[in-house]
Amino acid sequence: MHRIAAWLAAYAVPASLVIGLALGTRMPAAAQTLVVPLTGQRHRAIATDSLFHTLFADFYPQDDKTTYVHTGDIPAMWLRDSAEQALPYVRFLVAYPILRRRIAGVVERDARNIDKDVYANAFTARYGIWERKWEVDSPGWPMLLALVYWQHTADRSLFTPALHLALKRIVFTYGCEEHHRVCNRYRWPHSVPTHERYDDATGLIWGAFRPSDDPVEYRFNIPQNAFAVVVLRVIARLATEGYADRGLARQADAVAARVQVGILRYGLVYDPQRNDWMYAYETDGDGRFNLMDDANMPNLTTLPAIGWCSAYDPTYLATRAFALSLDNPWFFTGKYGEGLGSPHTPYGYVWPLGIIGRALTATSSQEVAESITTLAETDSENGLIHESFYPGGYWRYTRAEFGWGNALYAELIFRSLAGFRSNQFVRDRTIVPFEVPSETPTLVPEIVQVDNTAELMATLGRLLYLGRMRAGQVK
């Protein structure tokens, strides 16, 4: 009870809720709502149940004590998606320890998936390979989830042999792919429009596909490499604190340092139109690059969200200005919204993921409100998030329900309306030295944030109680 009270006290949650949680009393049967401020002095009520939709609809506990997570409408478990679908809910584990097994089970299952094939990006419920697209960032996402789980729970049962092996395989693979030609034989069996010329001595990690699952144009994707630097620092910490494996930690730090230098040497380009330096999206390390940004994370727009830099970093700001403008060939605008799109969906379609990523890295409440307004006016009737939609007619969309989008939207609401802090992945604040990590601006006063936190806590408690009732665990 003291641990629950201490956690909730940090958010000034009413004492009655603390007592109710500690004693296991029944949560209110009625559904709760939050009032979301929109632009134009408008408001919209959203059902708090929808913010936990993916946690209860897409997570499947397995007999081997792992958790299988599908994307919401595809019967496969993506490494990236499953970790992102779990991350927003780790902050509730102290108040609701019953969720620990569910979240730790995601880490363990992803670790076993990585151990089966580090190059695969998606797996079946029986540990089969659903898709074998080498995406530099994919195996790294479960490591971020592992770190955040460890930070919130100090639960040493997380550090299983499977996770240790996964850490080793990621470090080895990232190091190997710095020299793809001589180290690895990974091949995608189908023809793709990727330029095969590249410099093998850049220190950057060779990739085959983007976070959107589309083939790269040039072999070195900069946001994926930036993400890999963050992941390698995380692995060094997990290896040391979880396994006392300082040799692995040194290897991870060494690869991270080389990739970081490679990004700064080959990933920056000068934009004469803006008279400033900015990050390229991809490069071959031999003078060619493409200037764009894709809605799928990690991307250039969300570099502060992964801990690479601050939202006030000058190079990032120049990059962001380009990415969120019509100069970016994958930024689209229409009557009902604007935002980043992707070659993965019809040309001209905007991804809610891109809108959410923009809001999470915004520096003004106005930009957050504008983003949430677009999301509120273009989502499904039950408040769930699409994969993409046509900004000239939001009723035209792809995928009615997208687990990753639902979870990331919940993260945005948790931060902007309840005042929850962002997850910190980098011990020294950001990878770029001497920068302070930024936080998502809030939209409501602190007293309203307290009420919203109480509503969210009560909703989660009620949903857990109803789940136990359906399972026959309570009467």
Image (cartoon, rainbow, N blue to C red):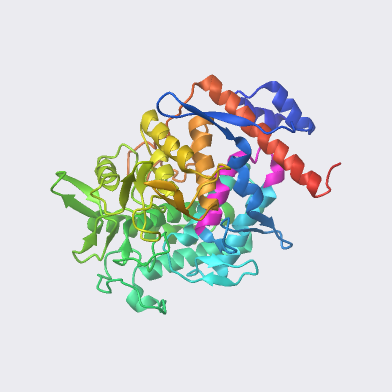
Q: Nearer the viewer, residue 15 or 255?
A: 15
Where, by quadrant of the figure, is residue 35 drawn?
top right
Where, by quadrant of the figure, is residue 305 drawn?
top left
95 in magenta: yes
Q: Nearer the viewer, residue 399 or 411?
A: 399
Quarter containing the N terminus: top right
**Residues drawn in magenta:** 80-99
* Residue 240 shows in the view: no
The x and y percentages for residue 287 are 18, 64
Q: Residue at x 26, y 56 (%)?
A: 267
Vertical placement of residue 147 versus 209, above or below: above
Query: Seen in the image, is 214 located left or right of residue 472?
Result: left
Q: Residue at x 32, y 45 (%)?
A: 333
Q: How many numbered discs sit on the rendered protein? A: 0
* Residue 398 shows in the view: yes
Quarter containing the C terminus: top right
Query: Seen in the image, is 468 located left or right of residue 72?
Result: right
Q: Residue at x 50, y 57 (%)?
A: 80
Identify the main secondary structure in magenta.
Answer: helix
The x and y percentages for residue 57 are 65, 51
The x and y percentages for residue 319 are 26, 46
Q: Nearer the viewer, residue 228 or 224?
A: 224
The x and y percentages for residue 401 are 55, 52
Query: Seen in the image, is 334 located left or right of residue 111?
Result: left
